[in-house]
Image (tube, helix red, strand yellow):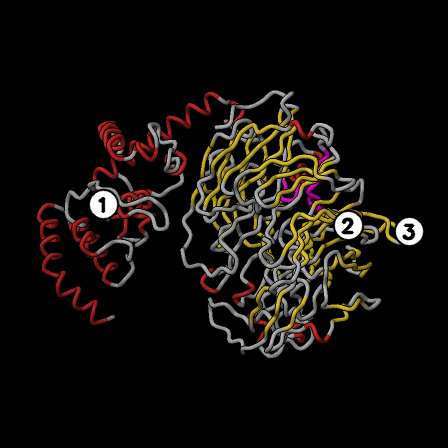
């Protein structure tokens, strides 16, 4: 490496001297100094984005690409900006755009076969625009364009001017969206009575149930599509739950964006894009499942483990907090949970040997309030369940969103599998607090109690499924209960005040446990552990359910659960070794061949664990797809869900499918519902598009675009 740099210095030195001499003949010493600083940064590897030959061209006097901003900070996204914005430049850019760009991006830059540039440029750095046009964008149809450096800046100036004109016109034409009414803590606590959808899971108790009843089992067949909006995403199947507030819908599109849409017609109000690294260690896709709203601020988790605050009315970034180091496997895919003036977040990365955590940040400035590790360190209760320093890389990720009881002041958060996965080595007695639910004090971040669903989990089942809170009668006594349909195949009921075990019953086929002790400890079958030759166990590694959210109807006391009956062959055939940023696995699994698989939605009576109805969606062998979207129930006696490209509505009492519609895309997201001007809407992300329906007898928005 040093030899290469030395050769580059020798070859480039004469040219550099000529350039700097030319600069010195007509410029002040400071102009020479910044050029020397930029060249030094390039030679030392701090400007990998700029090819060496172009750097030599761009440090010449009069270059349209000005590098002086890099002298203090070699960050191209901050240091290289478009210095041309005068009317003549904008006019020239319009001509270049018409010659080169219009075929893909449309006459008004709102998109054709290519994306909407007006939305994109508002949240794209000048350098990212320039480099995309000059060299293209990997894994897309965008190729480098035959334009000079000046022409690229001219097109950039034209699009930014057009985007500003459109934004001013939109705000002038829709005064209701010119400002954003604050979302208060009181509104969040009463979210289940709101016309909007302002909490990720519908309310703090994670019911995903709406009191709206304009759409019923009697009229649901009359639903019609009101609008559909394409999202600017590379992922073919998004998992986002939209947030609806103040006439806006906020929806994420992985791996790097957020869109604000007009809820009446799907028009894009603004987009935010923040590039993330291409090489983030991920086990299961580059997803972002949603955002949170507080006051007039939108809180956005990022794939590289940052928490970002945006101005809800414009998408302008307010602050940026680092939650974890993505190089070591930390990521964020779950929506934040807003409680009063703090933002609670979890992290992904358990399969890469991170140490899981739940953290609280100030909503005002992003400062850290507390951090609660899910794997206890030396001197902390539970550390004795790990051997040596295995706790340092113990997993226990917190990659979905928790629930909250304001009266008890407790946050309930599920934790993921212990690491290394598919083995119990270095875990002396249970691997706390992996595959558990933690009750965390909202003010201090201290763990008040825990319950471990799968001790020393060596099947990768996690406990990150939706946690539901409700007061219900159990054995003749009303209990402040917590429920979870766990990936391990059991439906659990706990007392949420202290974590005491109430009952557990299987809702799907399972062969790993023979029952529970009176204290709630699972009795694990000795023949269920991974072996060198392989052990067949139900459920499969994907689980009897997964992150796909359930919904809870408090009137019926039914939890509607996306369910899977399937098995995997679990192996233990290699010794795990931790390496920073690499997958940390004790072994592996594979799907079973010619073993029946059933995909279903099941209604579980939370007072007893009994299955009230069971609707199979698909049956077959290992060719049956197990992925689903989540569920939504309503006071219209309906349960909305999706599978295999179809969105449907079920009768909440019987599970009978009474309406469906094909959407032509994979559906991995849960639906939501909300009211606008007295009209109930239902929205769902399918593929990379948002679809919205309402009844035809009510006032409608714009036609489908």
Please say whether residue 209 is one of the residues in the magenta stretch: yes
Q: Which residue is mark 2?
A: 604
Which secondary structure lies at badge 2?
Answer: strand
Residue 470: where, in percent of width, then height?
Answer: 78, 47
The tag on residue 66 is 1
Mark 1 or mark 2: which comes first in sequence? 1
Does residue 103 appear left or right of residue 457 in this picture? left
Q: Which mark is in front, 1 or 2?
A: 2
Tell me the chief SS of the magenta region.
loop
Q: Quarter-wise, where is residue 451 in the image?
A: bottom right
Q: Are marks 2 and 3 in contact (CB under 8 Å)?
A: no
Q: Which residue is mark 3?
A: 476
Q: Is residue 77 visible?
A: yes
Vertically, is 432 above or below 437? below
Does residue 209 appear left or right of residue 245 in this picture? right
Please say whether residue 570 is one of the residues in the magenta stretch: no
User: Magenta segment range?
Assistant: 199-211
Q: Are marks 1 and 2 in contact (CB under 8 Å)?
A: no
Q: Residues within 10 Å of mark 2 (few under 14, many from 20)?
A: many
């Amino acid at each position: 490496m040093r030899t290469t740099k030395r050769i580059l210095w020798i070859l480039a030195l004469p040219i550099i001297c000529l350039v700097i001499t030319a600069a010195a003949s007509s410029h002040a010493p400071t102009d020479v100094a910044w050029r020397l600083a930029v060249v030094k940064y390039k030679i030392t590897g701090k400007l990998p984005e700029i090819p060496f030959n172009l750097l030599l061209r761009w440090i010449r006097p009069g270059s349209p690409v000005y590098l002086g901003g890099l002298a203090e900070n070699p960050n191209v996204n901050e240091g290289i900006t478009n210095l041309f914005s005068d009317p003549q430049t904008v006019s020239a850019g319009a001509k270049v755009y018409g010659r080169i760009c219009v075929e893909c991006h449309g006459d008004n830059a709102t998109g054709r076969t290519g994306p909407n540039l007006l939305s994109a440029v508002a949240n794209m750095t000048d350098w990212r625009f320039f480099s995309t046009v000059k060299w293209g964008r990997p894994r897309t149809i965008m190729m480098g364009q035959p334009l000079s450096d000046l022409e690229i800046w001219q097109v950039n100036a034209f699009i930014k001017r057009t985007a500003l004109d459109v934004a001013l016109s939109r705000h002038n034409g829709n005064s209701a969206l010119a400002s954003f009414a604050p979302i208060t803590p009181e509104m969040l606590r009463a979210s289940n009575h709101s016309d909007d959808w302002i909490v990720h899971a519908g309310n703090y108790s994670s019911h995903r149930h709406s009191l709206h009843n304009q759409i019923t089992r009697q009229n649901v067949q009359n639903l019609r599509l009101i609008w559909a909006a394409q999202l600017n995403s590379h992922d073919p199947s998004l998992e986002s739950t939209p947030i609806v507030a103040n006439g806006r819908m906020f929806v994420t599109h992985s791996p790097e964006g957020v869109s604000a849409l007009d809820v009446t017609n799907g028009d894009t109000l603004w987009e935010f894009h923040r590039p993330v690294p291409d090489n983030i260690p991920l086990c299961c896709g580059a997803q972002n499942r949603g955002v949170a709203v507080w006051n007039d601020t939108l809180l956005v988790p990022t794939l590289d483990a940052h928490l970002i605050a945006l101005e809800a009315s414009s998408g302008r970034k307010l602050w940026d907090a680092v939650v974890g180091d993505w190089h070591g496997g930390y990521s964020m895919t779950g929506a934040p949970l807003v409680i009063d003036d703090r933002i609670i977040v979890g992290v992904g990365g358990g399969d890469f040997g991170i140490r899981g955590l739940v953290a609280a940040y100030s909503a005002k400035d992003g400062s850290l309030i507390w951090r609660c590790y899910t794997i206890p360190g030396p001197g902390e209760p539970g550390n004795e369940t790990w051997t040596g320093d295995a706790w340092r890389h113990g997993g226990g990720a917190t990659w979905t969103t928790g629930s909250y009881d304001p009266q008890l002041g407790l946050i309930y958060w599920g934790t993921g599998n212990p690491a290394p996965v598919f083995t119990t080595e270095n875990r002396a007695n249970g691997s706390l607090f992996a595959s558990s639910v933690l009750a965390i004090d909202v003010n201090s971040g201290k763990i008040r109690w825990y319950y471990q669903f799968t001790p020393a989990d060596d099947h990768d089942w996690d406990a990150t499924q939706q946690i539901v809170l409700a007061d219900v009668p159990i054995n003749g006594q009303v209990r402040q209960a917590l429920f979870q349909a766990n990936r391990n195949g059991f439906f659990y009921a706990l007392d949420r005040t202290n974590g005491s075990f109430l009952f557990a019953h299987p809702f799907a086929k399972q062969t790993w446990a023979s029952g529970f002790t009176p204290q709630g400890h699972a009795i694990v079958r000795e023949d269920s552990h991974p072996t060198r030759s392989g052990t067949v166990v139900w459920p499969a590694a994907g689980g009897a359910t997964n992150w796909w959210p359930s919904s809870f109807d408090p009137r019926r006391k039914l939890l509607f659960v996306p369910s899977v009956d399937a098995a995997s062959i679990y192996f233990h055939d290699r010794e795990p070794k931790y390496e920073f940023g690499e997958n940390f696995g004790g072994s592996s699994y594979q799907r079973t061949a010619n073993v029946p698989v059933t995909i279903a939605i099941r209604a579980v009576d939370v007072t007893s664990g009994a299955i009230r109805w069971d609707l199979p969606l698909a049956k077959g062998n290992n060719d049956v797809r197990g992925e689903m979207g989540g569920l939504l129930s309503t006071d219209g006696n309906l349960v909305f869900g999706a599978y295999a490209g179809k969105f449907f509505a079920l009768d909440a009492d019987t599970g009978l499918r009474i309406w469906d519609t094909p959407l032509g895309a994979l559906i991995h997201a849960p639906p939501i519902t909300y009211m606008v001007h007295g009209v109930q809407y239902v929205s769902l992300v399918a593929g990379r598009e948002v679809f919205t329906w309402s009844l035809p007898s009510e006032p409608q928005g714009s036609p489908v675009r």
